[in-house]
Amino acid sequence: MSFSGKIVNIIHRWATGPATRRWAVSVVGMLTFLAMCVVVIWGSTKVDALIGIRVTGFSTLRQILGWPLVAFGFILIYWTLIFFFRKRGTPFPLNPPRNLITSGPYAVSRNPMLGGGFIWSFGIGLLLGSITLFLIATPVFIAIFTIFVTRIEEPELQMRFGQAYLRYKSKVPRFFPTRCRRDTWSQT
């Protein structure tokens, strides 16, 4: 069995295990993820300062472009969290909802939270004038999570939901919608 296959099995075992264990580990996992985000943002600004590449000009333009990206990304992340919590789960892979979520933002993207995170991160990079965050850290974040989603998350979802997930996967794009139909956004 491949390394990623072993990880998929471990996540599947935890994701389908006792609720108390899942909730305890998800709090630690989500706090760790948030701390890593803060460190990456802070570290990116420090790298910019260290090598002297921070953008100080175009402040108004950066704000005009950055704030809508930050706001849209945040709203998308928050909206997806509502769907996770309504289904009694979290976005943390070891404590997912018991049912496959296919409505709301999940009707047009299989990973709207990550899409929102990508957009939010680009916006923060613009607002801070951080070339490192905008051109290096965010693209690396996108690459890492794309690998995680394709090699770990999608196979685990297929194990858990079988044909229902495969049908969903065939109809809905991974990150960004190719078409947006209002009638698919019901909150069921």
Image: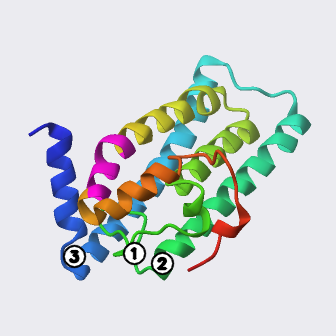
**CB under 8 Å between callouts 2 and 1?**
yes
The answer for how far apart the CA atoms under marks 3 and 1 are is 13 Å
Of the 4 image quadrants, the one containing the C terminus is: bottom right
Residue drawn at point x = 60 percent, y = 63 percent: 105
Q: Which of 100 and 41 is in front in this view?
A: 100
Amino acid type, label 3: Arg
Residue 21's tag is: 3
In the figure, residue 143 lies in which quadrant? top left
Residue 85's tag is: 2
**CB under 8 Å between callouts 2 and 3?**
no
Rendered location of residue 144, percent (x, y): 41, 37
What kind of element bears circle 3?
helix
Determine which residue is flagged by label 1. 89
Specify how the rendered protein is coloured.
rainbow
Q: Nearer the viewer, mark 2 or mark 3?
A: 2
**Which stretch did the figure color magenta?**
149-158
Q: Is residue 139 rendered to the left or right of residue 99?
A: right
Residue 22's tag is: none
Q: Is residue 129 rendered to the left or right of residue 121?
A: right
Inspect the magenta stretch and tell me whether residue 49 lies in it.
no
Q: Is residue 68 rendered to the left or right of residue 136?
A: right
Q: How crowded is mark 3: few (under 14 residues within 10 Å), some or many (20 or more)?
A: few
Q: Which of marks 3 and 1 is in front?
A: 1
Q: Is residue 149 rendered to the left or right of residue 71?
A: left
Amino acid type, label 1: Gly
Q: Which residue lies furthest to the right in this view?
A: 60
